[in-house]
């Protein structure tokens, strides 16, 4: 497990330094920067920026206050812009390479400035988009659904990532949107928290305004980072929120199954080994499975799961990472999938991790109508 984490962190560091080196190289070459002192200043700024998110994360965990939050927000917004800036610079060099092949000339400075403006606009839109989740309505036909649940509405919340960026005001907006759907039941499929230290109870205050008594939650990887006990304490603001830890609860004839999230490669029981022994488990019964990640889909189907709800993927959050999640999750990174009596819905989630930016998808609160 630790080897995987170290490899991922190593890859992130390489990508950060590589991206900032590309900026330095491009500025020097495209704008003919020859002044030695200016080169040193540019290199120094880019080295700092390449480390800024790591430094900001350490500071924010060391002491959570307005200054460290602002530094964290600055560094995360820079990451958002960096993503688009690197794409723009790659496009510049690819266009230049293509035109050179056909022996055509290119005003490299003008092309770079034009694509830089596009990168800025994409970042502004992406940041605005990240802070404005929408309602996504879907309908799901569940076999053997009890009469009580026919036509009823559920809401799925996932990947809110409350912490240094998404604060109490953001959660209040989500709660208000959730209440407009008048749900009979609410499912929270992990990563409600971002894993930060500090006064978590202050962030979760709006949860007491949820207008339903049936609220079920499972942990995500970020609750594991935070600590399950800290998450539970922060959720005491609303006694109706119940965290399911490999449990099945009968809710007026609907079996709600919540499984504890395990990291990829972490040892643990399979879906079958956990679910089959649960009291009340019935292959034919109407049920909803809550698990943070869209995983073990065929196994869930074979267990008679009627609706599996997941998040975690963020649908890549921003271009080009959406292509990576689509590949990694074998096409099950976002949307409603129906395989016989089995349904899977994977949400983009309401918040973001790292860069507070979304391009290529919208953050969402999922409203599910049972049929």
Image: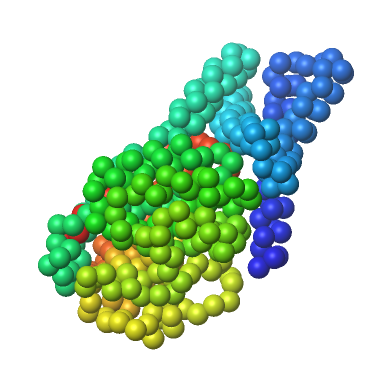
Position of residue 203 relative to residue 311, above or below, is above
Number of numbered discs visible in the structure rendering: 0
Where is residue 346? Give x, y as percent. Answer: 37, 56
* Image quadrant where residue 83 sits: top right
Please tell me which residue lies in front, 254 or 9. 254
Where is residue 57? Give x, y as percent. Answer: 68, 44
Outermost residue on the bottom side: it is 277
In the rendered image, the quadrant that contains the C terminus is bottom left
Please tell me which residue lies in front, 83 or 234. 234
338 left or right of 94 in image: left
Position of residue 302 relative to residue 332, above or below, is below
236 left or right of 332 in image: right
Please tell me which residue lies in front, 299 or 35. 299
Q: Is residue 113 visible?
A: yes
In the rendered image, the quadrant that contains the N terminus is bottom right
Q: What's the residue at 29%, 54% (across, down)?
A: 212
Q: What's the residue at 39%, 38% (across, down)?
A: 173
Outermost residue on the left side: it is 147
Where is residue 16? Give x, y as percent. Answer: 69, 41
Please tell me which residue lies in front, 338 or 137. 137
43 left or right of 129 in image: right
Position of residue 217 relative to residue 257, above or below, is above
* Image quadrant where residue 290 sits: bottom left
Q: What's the residue at 69%, 58% (across, down)?
A: 7
79 left or right of 284 in image: right
Q: What's the residue at 72%, 32% (across, down)?
A: 49
Where is residue 170? Give x, y as percent. Answer: 45, 38
* Image quadrant where residue 79 sits: top right
């Amino acid at each position: 497990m630790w080897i995987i984490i170290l490899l991922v962190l190593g890859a992130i560091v390489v990508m950060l330094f590589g991206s900032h080196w590309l900026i330095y190289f491009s500025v020097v070459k495209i704008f003919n920067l020859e002044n030695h002192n200016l080169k040193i200043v540019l290199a120094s700024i880019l080295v700092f920026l390449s480390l800024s998110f790591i430094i900001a994360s350490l500071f924010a965990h060391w002491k959570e206050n307005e200054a460290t939050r602002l530094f964290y927000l600055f560094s995360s917004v820079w990451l958002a812009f960096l993503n688009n800036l690197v794409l723009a610079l790659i496009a510049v060099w690819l266009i230049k390479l293509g035109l050179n092949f056909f022996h055509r000339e290119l005003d490299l400075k003008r092309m770079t400035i034009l694509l830089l403006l596009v990168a800025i606009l994409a970042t502004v839109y992406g940041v605005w988009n990240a802070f404005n989740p929408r309602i996504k309505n879907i309908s799901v036909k569940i076999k053997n659904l009890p009469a009580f649940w026919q036509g009823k509405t559920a809401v799925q919340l996932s990947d809110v990532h409350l912490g240094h960026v998404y604060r109490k005001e953001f959660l209040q907006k989500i709660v208000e949107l959730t209440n407009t759907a008048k749900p009979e039941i609410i499912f929270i499929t992990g990563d409600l928290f971002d894993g930060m230290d500090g006064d978590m109870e202050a962030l979760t205050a709006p949860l007491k305004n949820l207008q339903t008594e049936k609220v079920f939650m499972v942990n995500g990887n970020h609750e594991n980072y935070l600590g399950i006990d800290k998450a539970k304490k922060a959720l005491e603001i609303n006694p109706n929120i119940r965290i399911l830890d490999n449990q099945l609860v009968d809710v007026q004839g609907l079996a709600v199954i919540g499984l504890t999230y395990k990291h990829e490669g972490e040892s643990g029981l399979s879906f079958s080994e956990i679910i089959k022994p649960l009291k009340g488990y019935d292959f034919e019964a109407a049920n909803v499975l809550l698990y943070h990640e869209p995983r073990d889909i065929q196994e869930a189907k074979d267990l008679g799961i009627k609706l599996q709800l997941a998040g975690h993927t963020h649908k890549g959050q921003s271009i080009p990472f959406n292509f990576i999640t689509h590949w990694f999750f074998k096409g099950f990174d976002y949307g409603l999938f129906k395989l016989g009596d089995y349904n899977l819905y994977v949400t983009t989630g309401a918040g973001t991790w790292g860069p507070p930016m979304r391009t290529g998808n919208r953050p969402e609160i999922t409203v599910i109508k049972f049929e």
